Structures are given as structure tokens and as C-alpha cells.
Amino acid sequence: MKFGGTSMAGTERIRRVAGIVKRQQEAGHEVAVVVSAMAGETDRLVTFCREANALYDPAEYDVVVAAGEQITSGLLALTLQAMGCKARSWLGWQLPVRTDDAYAKARIEDIDSGALLASMAAGEIAVIPGFQGLSPDGRVTTLGRGGSDTSAVAVAAAIGADRCDIYTDVDGVYTTDPRIVAKARKLKNVTYEEMLELASVGSKVLQTRSVSLAMKEKVRVQVLSSFIDETAPAADTIPGTMIVSDEELEGLDMERQVITGIAADKNEAKVTLTRVADRPGAVATIFGPLAEANINVDMIIQNIAKDKGETDVTFTVPAADLLRTQALLEERKEAIGYYRLISDDKVAKISVVGVGMRSHAGVAATMFKALAERGINIQAISTSEIKVSVLIDADEVELAVRVLHTAYGLDAE
Amino acid sequence: MKFGGTSMAGTERIRRVAGIVKRQQEAGHEVAVVVSAMAGETDRLVTFCREANALYDPAEYDVVVAAGEQITSGLLALTLQAMGCKARSWLGWQLPVRTDDAYAKARIEDIDSGALLASMAAGEIAVIPGFQGLSPDGRVTTLGRGGSDTSAVAVAAAIGADRCDIYTDVDGVYTTDPRIVAKARKLKNVTYEEMLELASVGSKVLQTRSVSLAMKEKVRVQVLSSFIDETAPAADTIPGTMIVSDEELEGLDMERQVITGIAADKNEAKVTLTRVADRPGAVATIFGPLAEANINVDMIIQNIAKDKGETDVTFTVPAADLLRTQALLEERKEAIGYYRLISDDKVAKISVVGVGMRSHAGVAATMFKALAERGINIQAISTSEIKVSVLIDADEVELAVRVLHTAYGLDAE
């Protein structure tokens, strides 16, 4: 079980969490719990670090920020004990959760599960601070913001858990953002690949890394609301969204829709370079420097060469990287050989995602037709095996999502 | 060097501390720094623990409260780095600081100094969170409130430091409380035994355990103000109070006063049992149960037996334990065999302390005469080799301290 910062914010909320955990134990489960820091605490500690040293040493930063989860893990163990449960905390260095030495953004390499399994078998609830680990040098590491989801999946994999229940602010994964489409439906099941595509295009239910890890380790992850009544039945009977493999999904859900969900991402910006020389290697002079600067280029369109062997190249980058992108390309204007650089951050990417796409033709065509009927102009297209994305004007996002939700038959009755 | 919670409370104050530390390094010293949590932080964490579980598991309590010093140690390392120093934090479990398993009040058994010394020799300033250690079971321990002074002395002993500078809210040890006696003088030197006696009678400059440890390990401890200007010369030249052995003191301070300091303690209460049977074993029936209840009896007076083989027994206990003391003695009224129990918490203990007492007669006589001349009634007396204490009415404390300060020639010119 994993609880986020909102669930751990203060004594009263921790008591609610303890109630939910205790109920699982009473239902006959051996339970390990991964916790985040209290909401706001990590921000407070990060601010201290920045004030102390703007160019901070990530190893010392990790010493400071890991304290937030240490505190909540001890407090949840104390609260469970007050409710009559046996419980103890296991800090990152105690298990240990071995990571690489990329301080402040470490990756988990291995978790020793021996002591943990013995403690759980003896009836103790194990409480584990998320987000933290131990470097090969024996120092504290952290996994980067939101890393507690990844901690939870890694612990579940290490102990061979039947399930990893991640309690969040929402009660599951929806066909699209319910704030945009009132008829959005909660999904009973979604595959790892779908979840990854949805996460990468703006559906922020789980940290992407945690989903990749769950897929690799075959951990069944369930997304649940932490605001359920703690006196309700144990989570087994509360319908969240289960994230499963393709194979498991086939057994579960024969009458599945072709499209599982629709996501919108407003954090993209579009860049066009006009009249680029249409010769081998021209594209490399554009995208090589961006890759070196760690700027993630997403959609790319190269118009068919017009006269004079010239072409326009359009692509998208994260909006946060737009200024750096412009600077890099202007520096290299001569080397690349283009006429004008045009950028636009008033764009949005709409993606339809579904494993059903593999066996159904016409998904993209349905999308283009539905958008065209409402006069929504498509500026760029990209596809993967289970996803079709289009770039449109940012002002048309809500309309486009609603139109597509209906077009793919996702609206709730 | 050790800095307390007031010195570590926030980014700006930590920057001042870093300035003081850096100056020591620039003066050619290898430096290890022990830090407390930010002022108020430990109280915040203790409150969380109490709210979570009134009868808290001390092992989990330690996980929570140790986080405060972890945070400040990382922040001081970051701040020193920002000033161009090499610095790194060493958490209790990393050195490790080995303690027993008395969670929440652990005692340090041993500190591995190898890695620490190597790091310091390489020019790194070592930053060590005070108050925390590692139990034989590999779990976090803490040393009890105020334990960072003890951590500092233990680290100084482990690395064979020339000196342990403890920076506090005051700038040294005074002949008496300067808030009571304006003419109190700061002492250049004081012995371990004197410091212990002064601490035990209410002069709260250092934690008593830290002084005992310094005496045992022969660590030279200096008490200094952390509010000195960080641009001032390094601490070598700032006169704090040095705590030294008898032998060292003799070399330093030939013209020493007989009395070093005067302390007042208002946290005592007086209990009198009247008409106790004057027979062998009677006193054991009184003090046995109090000892079992962990109530620390200090002064004891047994009046000379009057007629009928009866006597009055008067003694003092900490005021906080008075109610428990009364309850215990009333339960046992028959077994002890006394007539009345009279208690008084409007009393105070005044102590004069000085190693010079060993070679000078008449110290107690001077005390009694000076108090008698001002009409101050002595209710009880106790003595040790280097201390004379008297119990008086609480209302007369300030007067008594001033009178004695003059009588022993301690007033500043």
C-alpha cells in the first residue's frame, strides 16, 4: 500500500491511513506500506536547500529532503501501534533500498527483502519511507520528485506482493479528465502500456517510472482513492483501477473498447524552421544539438520538398524548453541554413490511447474526421502502436476532447 | 565545534554558523561540527509523536525526532560548500555512533573515527548531527533532550580533538546568574567537578552528561557565545570559559578564589514527617519506596531524638515529584509510623561550589554567618567535597545569592 503526501498531512490524516491499513491486515493480508512526506514538507526542505546553496550538492540535498519521509514512516508506525497493530519502520538504508549514485534522481537497483519478509511473517506491518535509498558509497539517495510511487512498486516486486495499491487524490484512472468531460468513466482495468502512454501525454495519476517498473517486474498496481471511508470494507472490494498486463486484460475484459482513454497535454510548444536545405544530414544539424542539450523533441514533420531543394521542418518541444531551443537554433542558424524560426506555445497535444488499436483499423481516420467536422485544424500528427496524437490550437482542447470522447463511444450512459 | 538549536534556526543563522566554522578552518584547524535541530523543530516532532501515540514506542519516536538534526547537518554542509569549503555530513548510522539500545535515552558506547579522520585530513569539514546514534540492532537511537552536547564531547574524544568548543546562548560560565547579580564575573576556567556541581544545582549551560563524559575522556571543553560576530577573529582568541581538569587548572590559575560559583535551584520541595519512631530501619521504610519510584531524594535531616524515642525526618525531592512523594508516603503511613506529613514547595537550594574548598577551612562557616547576618533562615544543609548547599525560603533566593557573592569576594570590580 502506498499513501501520498496529502494522505499523510498531519496526525488526523495519518490516523485515517492507519485505519485503512489495519483493515487490510484484518482481511488476512500481510502488509507493507510506503509513505510520502507530509504535503508541503518536501517543498519546505527543498527551499531550505536552495537558500543554503543555489548550486546545491545533490548528496547533501538528499540528506535534507529524505528526512520528510523518515518522519512520516515513524509516525505511521506509532499510529498503527496505538491501534493495537504490531508495526515498525524500515528506513532506506536499513532494508537497504540499494540505488545507483545519481543523487537527487537515483534509480533503484535492488531491495533486500529478507528482514522485511521475516518481520511481515511475524505479523508486523512494515512501514517504509518512499523516495529514499542508499548509494553504493553508503550515503542517502532520493529518487526525484514523485519517487514514492516507484518505491512502492519496487518494494512490491521485491517481496513478491500480490498487489500494489496506490492511494491517490483520485479514485482511479478515467477515460479522460472528468473536469473536462462530465461523462468520463472510471476504468476498471488499464494495461501498463496504456498507462505509460497516458502518463506521458499529461495524465498525472502515477509517476511514469513507477509504471515502467511495474510492467518490467509484472507488479499488479491498483489506483485507489485515499479519501474512502476508513470504516469501509477492505480495498479488495472497492473498485479502483487495476493496471495489468495485456494478457491479464484479455482474460478480464473481452468486450473492451478500442480506445481506452484520451489525454490532453498543454505543455508543448511548436517550432518551425522555414526553407531548410533538403539534403542528407540537414535534419541532424537541427536535432543533434537539441538532444545534447537534453531537450526532448516529440512530434516532427518535414514538409515535402518544394522547389529549389528547400523544405520546412516543424517539431514540438516541452514548453519549458522553448526559450533554450530558440537560443540554440539561432546560434546555429548558419550551420543549419534556414530562413526563419517561427514558434508557437499556444498549442496542445491530444492523444487517443488503447491496446485495442492493434487489432482495429480506422482509429486515426475516426479521429481526423471527428475533428474536421468541428472545424478543428490538425497541425501535426504522431503515432505509436497504441496511440495517435495530434497537435491542435490550445483554445480548442476542451472541445476536441469532448468530441473524441463521444466519437469513440466512451461517454458514460 | 557544537552549535545549538538557536544558532541553527533558519538559513540566515546557519550562514552565520558557517562563517564561524570557516574562520576556524582558515586559522589552520581541522574541524568537525556537531549540530542541533532548528530551535522548535524537536518540539514539533515530539508533539507529532505524542499525538500519534501517547505511549509511544521509543524506537519509532527516535526515527521521527532524529530527522531534525539530519536536516540541519545537510544544510550546514550545503552552506559551507556555498562559501567555498569542502564539507560533508556524517549521520549517526554512517560513522557510526554506536549506542546501547535504550531508545530515546541511549548512551554512546563507541564512535568509529576512521572515515571521519580521513575525510578531515583531506580538508573536508565534517558535519555531524548531534543527539543521534545507532543501536546494536541497527536502528536509530537518540540520546535524550540536550544530547547534542554529549555527541559533541564524544566526537571530540573519538577524534582526539585539541578542544571541543560548545557555542551557546551565553558567552561562558559565570560566578552566578548575571540576571540576579549584576556584578557576576565570567570565569576563564572551571573544573569538570565544579561544572558538574553547578549543573546539578541549576546552572544549565551544559548537559550534565556531557560534562561527565568530558571529565572521563579528558576532553577540553570551551563554552562560547554563538552570537559573536562571524567576522571576528577565530575562537582561539575569544575568551569563553574553558572546562579543564584540576591539574590543568592549577597550572593556569594560581591566584584562584576559594569559591568558583554560586547556584540557586528553585525546583526543590521539602517534606517533613513528624514523630517517626527512632529505631533501626525506620529510615529505610521511608526512602526505600521513594528510590523504587525513581524519586531522587537530595538533602536529609534527622533531628536528634526527643523523648519517647521519636524523631522528625526532613528531606527534599524535586518539586515535580512532590505529589507522587506525598501519595507514596500516605499509602505507607502505618508501615512507616509517623504522625504528620508536612510539605513545602516554597523553598530553594543555594549552593557554593569550588575546588578551592578542599584546601580552605571555614567555607561553610562564612556561608552561615553571612546568611544569618541578613536574617535568612537555613532549613537544611548538605555538603560534598567541593560544594556546600543550604535550603532556604524561596522568597529569599536573590538576596542570599547576592550576599554570598559579596561574602566570597566574587563581585567584579
Image: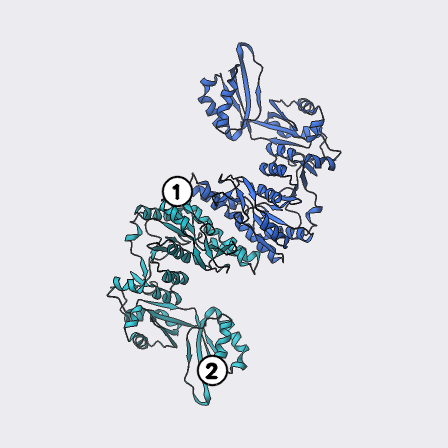
Chain colours: A blue, B cyan
The residue positioned farthest toward the right in the image shown: A255
Furthest residue toward top: A308
Q: CA distance from mark 1 to mark 2?
A: 67 Å
Against B400, residue A257 (above or below) is above
Report x, y in % for residue A339. Answer: 49, 16
Q: Along the horizontal axis of the image, is A346 left or right of A183?
A: left
For mark 1, name the chain: B
Tag 2 residue = B274
Tags 1 and 2 both on a single chain: yes
Quadrant containing the C terminus of chain A in the rendered view? top right
Vertical placement of residue B312 versus B210, above or below? below
Among all residues in the image, which is located at the extreme bottom? B308
Q: Hey, what amino acid is under mark 1? A: Gln
| One can see residue B183 in this view | no
Placement of B55 over or under A309, stated as above or below = below
| Numbered label attached to residue A177 | none
Q: Position of residue A6 (x, y in %)?
A: 58, 46
Q: Is residue A59 left or right of residue A307?
A: left
Q: Amino acid at mark 2?
A: Thr
Please tell me which residue is depicted at 65% across the width and 45% down the height of the picture.
A161
Tell me, yes or no, if residue B85 can be seen here: yes
Q: Residues within 10 Å of mark 2 (few under 14, many from 20)?
A: some
Secondary structure beneath dot 1 equals helix
Closest to the observer: B412 or A233?
A: A233
Mark whose residue sits in front, 1 or 2: 1
Residue A363 lies, in percent from the top left, at 69, 25
Task: Tell me the tag on residue B81.
Answer: 1
Nearest the viewer among A78 and B86 is B86
* Secondary element at tag 2: strand
